[in-house]
Image: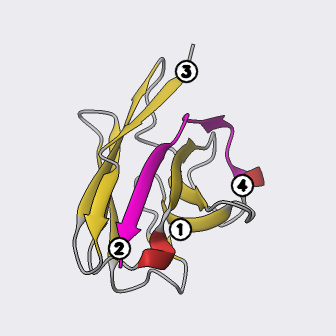
Amino acid sequence: QVQLVESGGGLVQAGGSLRLSCAASGRTFSSNAMGWFRQAPGKEREFVATIGGTGWGTAYANSVKGRFTISRDNAKNTVYLQMNSLKPEDTAVYYCAASRSPSGSSSGNGYHYWGQGTQVTVSA
């Protein structure tokens, strides 16, 4: 059974940093794309970042480009999201997702497994 478990969320002041982790178990995702999405209260889930399998690159939402960095440690079957220069509008529940495909997608439909989410709150 595949499980994705996020950690690293919390409360931070604007301008601060957090690093989210997503540990996968049940299968290896080194050849598969993984992504981060977020959902703020009253809003739809939105794409944040994705990293493809071996040989594939990364992609980011315009709203986080230059501030967030997605990376992965295949030996640990874990993907990370380093978030710098956080803004109050980054406040949301952040979800990790994994795909059966090596290519990343900005659509949630491109992912087959989801974590439970971790809350990130950025105070002004």
Cα separation, mark 1 vs mark 4, equals: 11 Å
Q: Nearer the viewer, mark 1 or mark 3?
A: 1
At horizontal 26% and vertical 75% (from top left) the residue drawn is 84
Q: Which residues are magenta?
A: 110-124
The residue wearing badge 1 is 48
The residue wearing badge 4 is 108
Disc 1 + disc 3, Cβ < 8 Å: no
Say which amino acid is labelled 3. Answer: Val
Task: Measuring from the top left, give residue 110's x and y in whole percent.
Answer: 71, 52
Say which amino acid is labelled 4. Answer: Gly
Q: Earlier in the sequence, mark 2 or mark 1?
A: 1
Q: Secondary structure at mark 2?
A: strand
Q: Earlier in the sequence, mark 4 or mark 2?
A: 2
Q: Earlier in the sequence, mark 1 or mark 4?
A: 1
Task: Measuring from the top left, give residue 21's x and y in whole percent.
Answer: 32, 44
Instruction: Give the crowd class for mark 3: few <14, some 14-19, many >=20 residues within 10 Å.
Output: few
Instruction: Give the crowd class for mark 1: few <14, some 14-19, many >=20 residues within 10 Å.
Output: many
